[in-house]
Image (cartoon, rainbow, N blue to C red):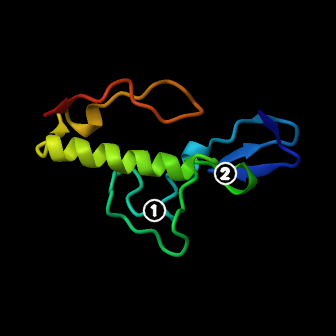
Amino acid sequence: MRYATEDAEIGGETVRRGEAVMPSLVAANYDPRMFGDPRRLDITRVPDGRRETHVGLSHGMHYCLGAALARQESEVAFEALLRRFPGLSLAVNGDDLERDLNPGAWRLKALPVKL
């Protein structure tokens, strides 16, 4: 938790000085000013300017030391998965996916797929 040092309006809500707030890095990745159609997974999306514009691996002095390894592991794993199952698709409508109730993260309870 953090505490507001002055009154501020955020998203149409007033936060008063001294009130507790809980910033969420997850929400930063959904800023439509930075990401066109931010709710859509688009592996071909090329960000403007900086190479990496999301904050999933933090930012600045807290940037994840394992970020390069995580990207490489993801690339290898997804490439192998899609090569083995080229018809991979969601088994349900995307709007029916349930999220885990964790305010600090964006997670699904399950990801049912058809192979």
N-terminal of the pair, mark 2 or mark 1, is 1
Front residue of this view, candidates 108 and 9: 108
Q: Which mark is residue 69?
A: none
- Count up the numbered dots: 2
Q: Quadrant of residue 98?
A: top left
Q: Which residue is mark 2?
A: 63
**Which residue appears at 20% of the width and 46% of the height?**
82
Q: Are marks 2 and 1 in contact (CB under 8 Å)?
A: no
Q: As displayed, is residue 3 above or below residue 33?
A: above
Residue 36 pos. (x, y %): 40, 64
Q: As displayed, is residue 90 above or below residue 53?
A: above
> The disc labelled 2 sits on which kind of residue?
Tyr
Considering the image in quadrants, where does the N terminus appear?
A: top right
Marks 2/1: CA–CA distance:
20 Å
Neighbours of disc 2 within 10 Å: few (<14), some (14-19), many (20+): few
Considering the image in quadrants, where does the C terminus appear?
A: top left
Front residue of this view, candidates 109 and 77: 77
Residue 8 pos. (x, y %): 78, 51
Residue 9 pos. (x, y %): 72, 51
> The disc labelled 1 sits on which kind of residue?
Phe
In the rendered view, does 112 fall on the left or right side of 32?
left
Looking at the rendered structure, the secondary structure element under dot 1 is loop
Is residue 41 among the parts visible in the rendering? yes
Q: Which residue is mark 1?
A: 35
Front residue of this view, candidates 100 and 70: 70
**Which residue appears at 71% of the width and 57% of the height?**
60
**Which residue appears at 42% of the width and 55% of the height?**
38
Is residue 91 among the parts visible in the rendering? no
